[in-house]
Amino acid sequence: MKKYFAILAALSMVLAVSCNKDDKGGKKTLDVDLTFDTQLGTLQYADAIEISAIASEAVATKAEAVLVSGSEGNWKACGEVQELTLDAVNVSGLFFIDSKAATGLQITLSDGKSSKDFVYPIAKVEGEMNVDIYTNDAMKMMADSMVQNFVNTPSLYPVEFTGKGSECPSFFCMHPVKIGSEVKHVLNLTEARSLDGQNLSFAWVNVLQNTANRAYIGGQRGYMFSGCRASSLGGGTTGRQCDLYEVEGHQIKDAKIDYNFGMTVVPGSWSNSYNEELFKFIDALYIKIDEKCETELSKIKANYYLSQIQKVLDNSTIGVEENPTSLANKTYLRRYGEAGDTSTKALVENFRAGDYVILKSKRGTEESPVYYYGILQVMQLFDDSGSMAVKEDTGKQYIDRQKGHDLFYKPNYFSVKTQCEILK
């Protein structure tokens, strides 16, 4: 990010345009000047610059900026108006470059009755934003029960490579896919399998049984974010073997999924693992990103704030050698650890509603990797307390085998704000 610092100097480089209007209810020109004496030169589209300017008097109550095109006396806004911070005579704030057509930066000072515009020339705007943004403030996911196929239900599917599909929304794609003409990030098994697992990042599952032989899983149990590698979905403490079988010529494949996808949980103050500085950092980024991100400016802002995850928490990926930071980047996250009836360890809660999960996807090649980051907030989990039981001899809490079935097909809600690839 480039920084543009104001200096107290002659205003010969400043093009000031006043908003002189008539007396028929229009605003009058505010009697003020503004020092912003730096040539802007060439700016990068979707970048952020730091504005710092000084007014000649503390008469304004509001400061705004917008990119404009045209020429002196005929400037027209070509971007969205962005509010700046005004503290007495000091004008400051991040300004996001949201138009390639801009030839000037206009700063407007006003007091509610009068205003004055100051336009500063820009040589040109170049570059592209090479990522897209996906947001969903009410993403519903449900854990799928066992899906029948020729392995686990041969009486119904005696022919190899046959089986059922499923309409349960249990898969998430950080990068978009196309199902017919619809662009989607949340898929069911039928959709995921039809694309051979393209871009699958995680599955929301309920750990209970091995879905190949129906045997109950002993040590672990309950809700879980699972990466979509065959070793993760088909692992002995995940049990989603039924998702991995080839059926009618299609199969979830490691070569097609978001293979280098990982997650880092950021729990709230309820947890013994609470890190106040980390939680507040992620919370602040999340709040600054619009829930819908429907405008160009909102997408640029979202991309900027999500990029801070890499710069602050994962800067080893950008070549920082002194005290580099790295994310945990787990391939799975369990709601509870040691929630099975055969585990001898105490049950541990790992996340709950209100907590955050940092999403990370590595694409490109080993020589030229490209990283994408996102934030998922757990909004509402289905109440799993009714599935709990306690062993009389040890007092250990666990999820009961039979009651664990009640956790399938129940709605769980998440909010996600993430960078993603541009769908071509």
Image (spheres, rainbow, N blue to C red):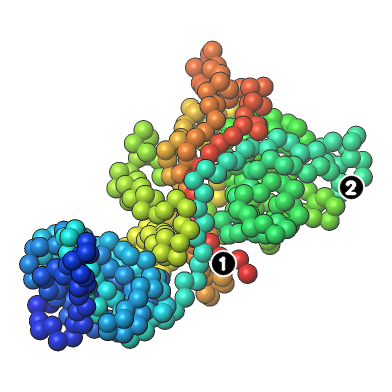
Q: Position of residue 396 (x, y in %)?
A: 51, 21
Instruction: Name the residue tied to disc 1.
Output: 422
In the shown orientation, is residue 232 left or right of residue 121? right
Q: Which residue is mark 2?
A: 160
Comparing labels 2 and 1, the label whose residue is closer to the camera: 1
Dot 1 crowding, Cα within 10 Å, few <14, some 14–19, many 20+: few
The vertical placement of 228 against 130, above or below, is above
What quarter of the picture does the C terminus occupy? Answer: bottom right
Using a 10 Å C-alpha cutoff, classify the residue at mark 2 as few (fewer than 14 neighbours), some (14 to 19) or many (20 or more): some
Q: State the residue at coordinates (76%, 55%).
A: 194
* Outermost residue, left side: 57
Residue at 57%, 72% (x, y): give it: 365
Most extreme residue toward the top is: 392
Return the disc, 2 or 1, that comes first in the chain's sequence. 2
Looking at the image, can residue 47 be seen?
no
Q: Residue 128, position in %: x, y?
A: 47, 75
Q: Is residue 112 left or right of residue 190?
A: left
Q: Please state the horizontal and vertical placement of residue 400, each as a whole percent of the image.
A: 61, 22
Q: Regarding mark 1 in the picture, which secondary structure is present there? A: loop
Tell me what residue is drawn at x 66 percent, y 27 percent: 405
Task: Give yes or no for contact between labels 2 and 1 (Cβ–Cβ under 8 Å).
Answer: no
Q: Is 378 located above or below residue 194 in the figure?
A: above
Q: Name which residue lies at 14% across and 73% down.
A: 34
Q: Residue furthest front?
A: 24
Which numbered tag is attached to residue 104? none
Q: Quick one: 280 or 244, which is closer to the camera?
A: 280
